[in-house]
C-alpha cells in the first residue's frame, strides 16, 4: 500500500515530539515504547501494518485541542482512532504521524428521555449506549456487527450501518449533535438535542468523513423506544433469483422489514457448521426477514411475507414462535464472518452496494470472477438495502493475498458498473482508496478535497486515506476562468 | 442589464455558471421561486432559472428510488409516487400560502431548503432522503456525489451539504431521492384543553412510546380555532394531536393504546381519512393557522421539552404560536417591529440553551427590508462562521451563487 512519503524532519525529532506531547498529556497518556506501540499498528484491516511515531490518549477536550495545535505547528500528521475496528484501514497509522486515541473519552454524559437523546463521549461503545438506556426500554438503533467493541466516535467517522438500517437508518440518520476539534485547536459544536441546525449541514458532512476533517469529542444521538416485539422468518429458496424476487415483492407490497438478510449456499453451510442454527442446507439462498413493532402488526406482516415467499417458490419457511427461536435464526447470520473464518485460513470482507434488482446478475458474475481468480467466495447480503458482503477466502501463507485483493477490486468495479457504490458501510480508508476513480471523476474528487482544505488546509489529518491523489490546497483553489469566452451562444436568455 | 438565464439541460447550466464566473456576474439560482421570501434578499443581477431542467429519468418503486432533474415540479413527482402508493416520507410542506405568489415548488427547491413536515420526527428531514446529487459549483465545474443506493459511505456526503444550502454552493441539476411506501392507514388522536407544558409532556410520552408515532403537534386554542377541520376549530380549546400510520391492524392497536394514554390527561377524539390529512397539511403549511395581519413569522427549533418556555417568553408581549415535532418546532407569529423580534426570539432560545447546545431560530417571513436588516438564519459562533465561509469558498470562491441569501 502506497502511503504519503514520510517527512524526514518529523521522523528525526521523534524524541522532541514525545516530550512535547508529555507536557500536554502527562503520565501513561503518551505511548512511545516500540513494543507497546505494536498494539496500534493496524486496525480491523490487518493486512496492513505500520508503527506510529507515538500514541497519545488525551483525557479532555482541551488536551485534544492542545495536541492538535502542537501537531499543526510541528507538521506532524494525526490519525484519530476509536476502538480500531475499521475494516477499511481508516485508523492505519502513518510512519511520521501520531495516533490520537479517544479511548479515555468513555463516559455517558447525559441521558435525556424526555427529549429522547443521549449525549456521550466518542469512546463509548455502540452497545454501551443501548445498554445504558435498556432499563427504560430504549435503545440506539444502528447496530454494526462489531457493536460490542466499536465506539460511537468511530461509528460517526465511518457512518456505520448494521442489519436494521433499512427501517431505522444508518448513523447519520440517528445523530443530533457533535462536538469536534479542528486541527487548529478550534472547538466547534453542531446540532444538539434539537433538529436541523441552520447553516450548512456540518453534522451530515462530518458523519462518514473518516477522520479527515476533525476529531470528534462528543456525540448526541437519538434514542428510540424498543419495539414491542419482533419475529423473524427463515425462508429457503431454490435459486438466488427466487430469493431476490421475494425481496423485491416484499418491498413492493409496502413492507419495510426491520431486517432482511440473505446468505448464499456457501455462507449458509459455513454458518450452520459453526453454530447449528438449523439452517436448511439444500437452499441456494437463505433469507431472514425480521418484522418488528406491535404484536398485531408483526403477526399481520409475518402472514403477508409468508404469502409472498410462497408465491416466489420458497422451498421451506419457518416463522419464529418465540424469542429463543428468533435469536437462533439470527445466530448463524451474526456468526457468518467467524464461521467463514473457520473454513479458510484468511478472508477479505468486501462491502459494495448494488441496486437490489441486480443481485442475481452480480452473484453470477462474482461466481465467474471466483473461477478467474482461483479463489472461493461466500456471499452475505443486507438484502433490504442492497449492501453486499462477499467474503473472499484465501491463504496469505500461500501467497494468495494479491489475488484476493485483485478479486475484491473486480467485485467493487462490478458494483459500480451496475449502478452501485464501492462501500456501503465500511468506509474507503486505504482499502478502497485507489478505486475511487472508478466511481468519481477527477473533478468530483477535487471538489471533495477542496472541502477538506476548508477544515485542514495543511492536510495533516489522516492523509493517505480516502483520496488516491493528494493535491495541495493552493493548487486546488486555483480557478481556470474562461475569460474572453463571454458569449456562450447556446444559452437560452430572456 | 439584468438577464434571465433558463438552461434546458445540465450542459447549459454549466455554460451559464461559467459565463457568470468569467464575467463575475452574481446569479440568483432558483427553481419555481415559491420560497423566494425565505432568506436574505437577493441582490444578484441575473437569474438562473432551473425549471426547464424537468423530468423524472428513473423511478423504480421496488427499489425505493427516484431520479429527477432538479427543476421537476414536486407535484408531478408526488402524483407519480401516489400511483404506486409511495411517497416522500419527509413530508415536504406546502408553504405557498406563507409566501404567496404562484411559483410551483420543485424537488430541487425543497431539498435546497431542507424542508420537512410533521413526519420529520420519525422519517427524518429532506437531507435524510437525498441519496445522490449532480450539480455545477460556483467554480463552473460539474460534480456529483452519492448515488442511487441507500447505503453508501463512498467519499464525503455532499448530499447533506447541498440540502439546506439554499443554492449558495452549487446549482443542483439532478437529484436522486429515497422514496418509501405510503402508509396503508392513518389515524390522528386528539386531546383537548391541555396547557402548553402539559401538552408537550403528553407528546413526549407518546413520542417515547413504542407506537412509532409520525406526528406530534399542539395547537393552543386561538390557533386551533383557525383550523378548517371541524373537530379542531369547534373544540373551543387547545388541541393536541398524535398521528399514527401503518398497516390497518397495527394502526387500530396503536390508536387504542395512545387514546388510552391521552385520555388520562384530557378529553379525546379521533380523526380519520380526510380530516386527519387536512389537519396535518395545515400544520405543515403554517400560514392558515397563524394570524395574517402583517405578522412576521419565526421558526424555532429547540429540544422538544423546551418549546413552551421559548414560546412563553416570546409571546409575553403579544403574538401567537403553535408546536410541531413534539414541541421541538415552534412556529411564532409576532406583530411587526424594527428588528422583526430577532432579539426577543433569539434571546428566548439562548435562555433555554444548556451547555452550548442551544437551538436555532429562522425568520421565515418578513418584509424584504427587514430580512436585509436582521440575520434570517441563526448567527453561528465566530469559529463556525469562519468554517462555513471556507466551505462556501471551496464551492463558490467568487461568491456568484445566491450571494447573501444565507449570511451577509
Image: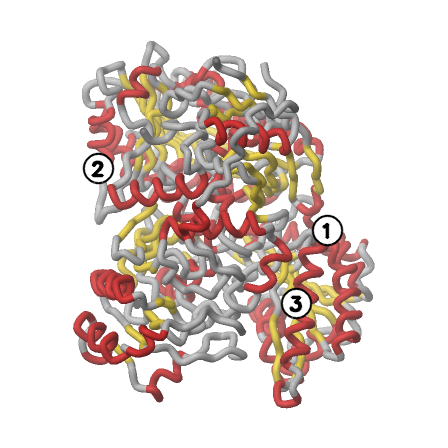
| Disc 1: which residue | A248
Q: Indicate the position of residue B244 as horizontal and vertical percent values.
A: 51, 38
Q: Residue B350 carries which label?
A: 2
Q: Indicate the position of residue A481 as horizontal and vertical percent values.
A: 50, 36
| Disc 3: which residue | A409
Label 3 environment density (alpha carbons within 10 Å; few <14, some 14–19, many ≥20)? some
Q: Quadrant of residue A38?
A: bottom left
Q: Indicate the position of residue A376 as horizontal and vertical percent values.
A: 73, 78
Q: Quadrant of residue B389?
A: top left
Front-most of residues A216 and B261: A216
Residue shown at the point (55%, 56%) measured from the top left: B154
Total marks in image: 3
Q: Indicate the position of residue B89 as horizontal and vertical percent values.
A: 55, 38
Q: Distance between the residues labelled 3 and 1?
A: 27 Å
Q: Do labels 2 and 1 share a chain?
A: no
Horizontally, residue B10 falls left or right of residue A99, namely: right
Disc 2, SS: helix
Amino acid at each position: 500500500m502506497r502511503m504519503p512519503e514520510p517527512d524526514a524532519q518529523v521522523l528525526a525529532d521523534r524524541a522532541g515530539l514525545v516530550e512535547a506531547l508529555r507536557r500536554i498529556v502527562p503520565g501513561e497518556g503518551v505511548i512511545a515504547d516500540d513494543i507497546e506501540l505494536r498494539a496500534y499498528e493496524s486496525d480491523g484491516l490487518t493486512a496492513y501494518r505500520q508503527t506510529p511515531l507515538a500514541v497519545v490518549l488525551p483525557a479532555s477536550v482541551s488536551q485534544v485541542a492542545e495536541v492538535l495545535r502542537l501537531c499543526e505547528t510541528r507538521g506532524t500528521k494525526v490519525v484519530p482512532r476509536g476502538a480500531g475496528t475499521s475494516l477499511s484501514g481508516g485508523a492505519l497509522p502513518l510512519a511520521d504521524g501520531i495516533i490520537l486515541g479517544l479511548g479515555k473519552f468513555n463516559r455517558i454524559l447525559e441521558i435525556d428521555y424526555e427529549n429522547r437523546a443521549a449525549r456521550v463521549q466518542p469512546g463509548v461503545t455502540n452497545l454501551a449506549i443501548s445498554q445504558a438506556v435498556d432499563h427504560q426500554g430504549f435503545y440506539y438503533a444502528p447496530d454494526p456487527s462489531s457493536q460490542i467493541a466499536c465506539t460511537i466516535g468511530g461509528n460517526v467517522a465511518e457512518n456505520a450501518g448494521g442489519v436494521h438500517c433499512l427501517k431505522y437508518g444508518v448513523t447519520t440518520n440517528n445523530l443530533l449533535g457533535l462536538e469536534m476539534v479542528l486541527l487548529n485547536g478550534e472547538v466547534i459544536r453542531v446540532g444538539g438535542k434539537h433538529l436541523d441546525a441552520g447553516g450548512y449541514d456540518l453534522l451530515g458532512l462530518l458523519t462518514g468523513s473518516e477522520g479527515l476533517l476533525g476529531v470528534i469529542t462528543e456525540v448526541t444521538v437519538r434514542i428510540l423506544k424498543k419495539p414491542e416485539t419482533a419475529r423473524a422468518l427463515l425462508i429457503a429458496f431454490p435459486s438466488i433469483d427466487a430469493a431476490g424476487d421475494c425481496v423485491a415483492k416484499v418491498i413492493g407490497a409496502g413492507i419495510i422489514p426491520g431486517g432482511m438478510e440473505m446468505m448464499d449456499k456457501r455462507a449458509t453451510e459455513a454458518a450452520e457448521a459453526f453454530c447449528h442454527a438449523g439452517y436448511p442446507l439444500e437452499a441456494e439462498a437463505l433469507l431472514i426477514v425480521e418484522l418488528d413493532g406491535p404484536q398485531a402488526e408483526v403477526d399481520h406482516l409475518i402472514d403477508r411475507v409468508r404469502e409472498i415467499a410462497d408465491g416466489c417458490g420458497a422451498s421451506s419457511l419457518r416463522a419464529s414462535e418465540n424469542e429463543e427461536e428468533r435469536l437462533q435464526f439470527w445466530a448463524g447470520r451474526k456468526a457468518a464472518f467467524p464461521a467463514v473464518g473457520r473454513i479458510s485460513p484468511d478472508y477479505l470482507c468486501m462491502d459494495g452496494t448494488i441496486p437490489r434488482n441486480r443481485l442475481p446478475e452480480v452473484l453470477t458474475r462474482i461466481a465467474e470472477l471466483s473461477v478467474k481468480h482461483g479463489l472461493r467466495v461466500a456471499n452475505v447480503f443486507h438484502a433490504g438495502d442492497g449492501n453486499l458482503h462477499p467474503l473472499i477466502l484465501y491463504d496469505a501463507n500461500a501467497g494468495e493475498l494479491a489475488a484476493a485483493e485483485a478479486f475484491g477490486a473486480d467485485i467493487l468495479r462490478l458494483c459500480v458498473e451496475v449502478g452501485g457504490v464501492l462501500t456501503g458501510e465500511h468506509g474507503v480508508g486505504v482499502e478502497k482508496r485507489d478505486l475511487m476513480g472508478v466511481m468519481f471523476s477527477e473533478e468530483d474528487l477535487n471538489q471533495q478535497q477542496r472541502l477538506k482544505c476548508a477544515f485542514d488546509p495543511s492536510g495533516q489529518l489522516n492523509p493517505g486515506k480516502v483520496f488516491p491523489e493528494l493535491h495541495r490546497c493552493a493548487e486546488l483553489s486555483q480557478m481556470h476562468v474562461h475569460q474572453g469566452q463571454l458569449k456562450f451562444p447556446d444559452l437560452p436568455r430572456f | 442589464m439584468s438577464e434571465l438565464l433558463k438552461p434546458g439541460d445540465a450542459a447549459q447550466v454549466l455554460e451559464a455558471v461559467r459565463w457568470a464566473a468569467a464575467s463575475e456576474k452574481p446569479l440568483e439560482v432558483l427553481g419555481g421561486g415559491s420560497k423566494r421570501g425565505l432568506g436574505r434578499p437577493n441582490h444578484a443581477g441575473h437569474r438562473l432559472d432551473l425549471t426547464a431542467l424537468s423530468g423524472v429519468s428513473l423511478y423504480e418503486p421496488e427499489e425505493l428510488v427516484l431520479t429527477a432533474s432538479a427543476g421537476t415540479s414536486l407535484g408531478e413527482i408526488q402524483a407519480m409516487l401516489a400511483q404506486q402508493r409511495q411517497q416522500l416520507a419527509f413530508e415536504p410542506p406546502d408553504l405557498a400560502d406563507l409566501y404567496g405568489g404562484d411559483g410551483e415548488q420543485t424537488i430541487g427547491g425543497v431539498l435546497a431548503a431542507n424542508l420537512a413536515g410533521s413526519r420529520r420526527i420519525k422519517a427524518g428531514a429532506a437531507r435524510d432522503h437525498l441519496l445522490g446529487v449532480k450539480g455545477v459549483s460556483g467554480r463552473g465545474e460539474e460534480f456529483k456525489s452519492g448515488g442511487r443506493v441507500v447505503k453508501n459511505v463512498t467519499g464525503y456526503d455532499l448530499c447533506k451539504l447541498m440540502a439546506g444550502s439554499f443554492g449558495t454552493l452549487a446549482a443542483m441539476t439532478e437529484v436522486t431521492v429515497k422514496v418509501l411506501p405510503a402508509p396503508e392507514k392513518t389515524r390522528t388522536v386528539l386531546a383537548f384543553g391541555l396547557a402548553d407544558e402539559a401538552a408537550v409532556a403528553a407528546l413526549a410520552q407518546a413520542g417515547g412510546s413504542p407506537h412509532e408515532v409520525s406526528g406530534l403537534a399542539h395547537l393552543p386554542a386561538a390557533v386551533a380555532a383557525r383550523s378548517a377541520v371541524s373537530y379542531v376549530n369547534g373544540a373551543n380549546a387547545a388541541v393536541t394531536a398524535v398521528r399514527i400510520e401503518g398497516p390497518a391492524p397495527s394502526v387500530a392497536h396503536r390508536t387504542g393504546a395512545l387514546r388510552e394514554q391521552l385520555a388520562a390527561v384530557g378529553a379525546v377524539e379521533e380523526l380519520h381519512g380526510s380530516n386527519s390529512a387536512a389537519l396535518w397539511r395545515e400544520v405543515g403549511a403554517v400560514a392558515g393557522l397563524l394570524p395574517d395581519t402583517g405578522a412576521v413569522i419565526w421558526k424555532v427549533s429547540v429540544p422538544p421539552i423546551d418549546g413552551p418556555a421559548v414560546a412563553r417568553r416570546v409571546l409575553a408581549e403579544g403574538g401567537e404560536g403553535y408546536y410541531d415535532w413534539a414541541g421541538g418546532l415552534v412556529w411564532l407569529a409576532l406583530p411587526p417591529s424594527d428588528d422583526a423580534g430577532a432579539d426577543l426570539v433569539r434571546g428566548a432560545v439562548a435562555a433555554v440553551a444548556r451547555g452550548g447546545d442551544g437551538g436555532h431560530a429562522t425568520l421565515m417571513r418578513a418584509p424584504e427590508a427587514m430580512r436585509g436588516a436582521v440575520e434570517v438564519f441563526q448567527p453561528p459562533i465566530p469559529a463556525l462562521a469562519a468554517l462555513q465561509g471556507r466551505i462556501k469558498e471551496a464551492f463558490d470562491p467568487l461568491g456568484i451563487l445566491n450571494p447573501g441569501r444565507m449570511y451577509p
